[in-house]
Amino acid sequence: RKEVEQDPGPFNVPEGATVAFNCTYSNSASQSFFWYRQDCRKEPKLLMSVYSSGNEDGRFTAQLNRASQYISLLIRDSKLSDSATYLCVISGNTGGFKTIFGAGTRLFVKA
Amino acid sequence: NAGVTQTPKFQVLKTGQSMTLQCAQDMNHNSMYWYRQDPGMGLRLIYYSASEGTTDKGEVPNGYNVSRLNKREFSLRLESAAPSQTSVYFCASSEGSGGDEQYFGPGTRLTVT
C-alpha cells in the first residue's frame, strides 16, 4: 500500500458544482496534514492546513479522520480558476521526520 | 522578497554530462529540500538540509549530491546525468523541519538525452 494515496482523477465538473477529494495515508503516527494546489507547469503552493477539528477557508473545507486515516477537501461553488491539481501532504515523525506528497488529483472546472 | 529562486529554468543535457542546479531563499528558513516530480507520481524527496551545515538523504538520492553553502543556498549536483534523471526539479524551504509549510521555487525542467 502506498504511504499516501489519492484518486488521480481527472474530475470534470461544471462551474458552481461541489466537489470532494479524499486522500488516505498509511502511517497512523502522522502528525501534520496539508492540501497544496499545483497549477499546470507551476510549483505547488499551500492551499490549507488540515486540523483535527476541521477547518474552513471560504469555499474550501478540509477534514481529518484519524480513525480511518484519511483527509478530505471539499470545494463549494467551483470556479474556473479552481482548475488545478490538488496534492495532499502528510508529515510524521517515525525514526526521523518525513513528509510525503500524494501524486495529486486533477480538477477541471468547465463553463 | 523573492521567496525561493531556482536557476536554470530549463536545461538539456547529454548522458554523462554534469551540472549543478542552484537554489536560494530569502525567508531566513532553516530547512531546505530538493524534490523531483515525474508524471503520475508525487514529489519525491532527493535530499534535504534541516539546518546550515547538515544534509540528509531522502527517498531517491542516488545519482545526486547536494551542498548547503550557507543558510540561503542549497545546490543539487548531477555528476553524470542519465536519461532516468529527466524530470522537473523543485527546491523548497521551510522555517522548521517538523511538518511546517514548505515554500517552493518555480522548478527546473531537465531533459537528459
Image: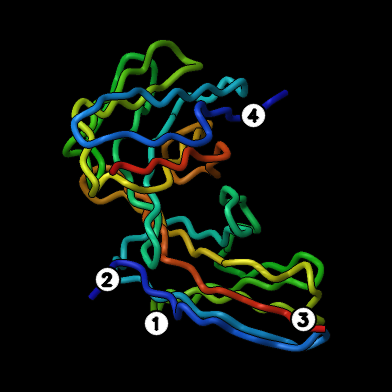
Nearest the eye: A23 or A44: A44
Q: Which residue is mark 3?
A: A76
On the picture, is B112 further left or further right than A21?
left
Nearest the eye: A76 or B24: B24
Q: Nearer the viewer, mark 4 or mark 1?
A: 4
Q: Position of residue A44 (x, y in %)?
A: 57, 51
Disc number placed over residue A2 in the picture, else none:
2
Q: Which quadrant does the N terminus of chain B fall into?
A: top right
Return the chain for callout 4: B
Q: Which quadrant does the C terminus of chain B fall into?
A: top left
Label 1 sits on a secondary structure element that is: loop
Q: Residue at x 45, y 23 (%)?
A: B22
In the rendered structure, which amino acid carries the disc numbered 4? Answer: Gly
Asked if disc 4 and disc 3 are in contact, CB closer than 8 Å, the reply is no
Return the chain for callout 3: A
What's the distance in space between the residues labelled 1 and 3, CA to CA? 24 Å
Q: Which residue is mark 1?
A: A68
Establish if A71 lies above or below B83: below
Label 3 sits on a secondary structure element that is: loop
On the picture, is A61 further left or further right than A34?
right
Q: Position of residue A7 (x, y in %)?
A: 45, 80
In the rendered structure, which amino acid carries the disc numbered 1? Answer: Ser
Nearest the eye: B77 or B19: B19
Q: Residue at x 39, y 67 (%)?
A: B40
State which quadrant residue A6 falls in: bottom left
Q: Which of disc 3 and disc 1 is earlier in sequence?
A: 1
State which quadrant residue A27 falls in: bottom left
Return the chain for callout 1: A
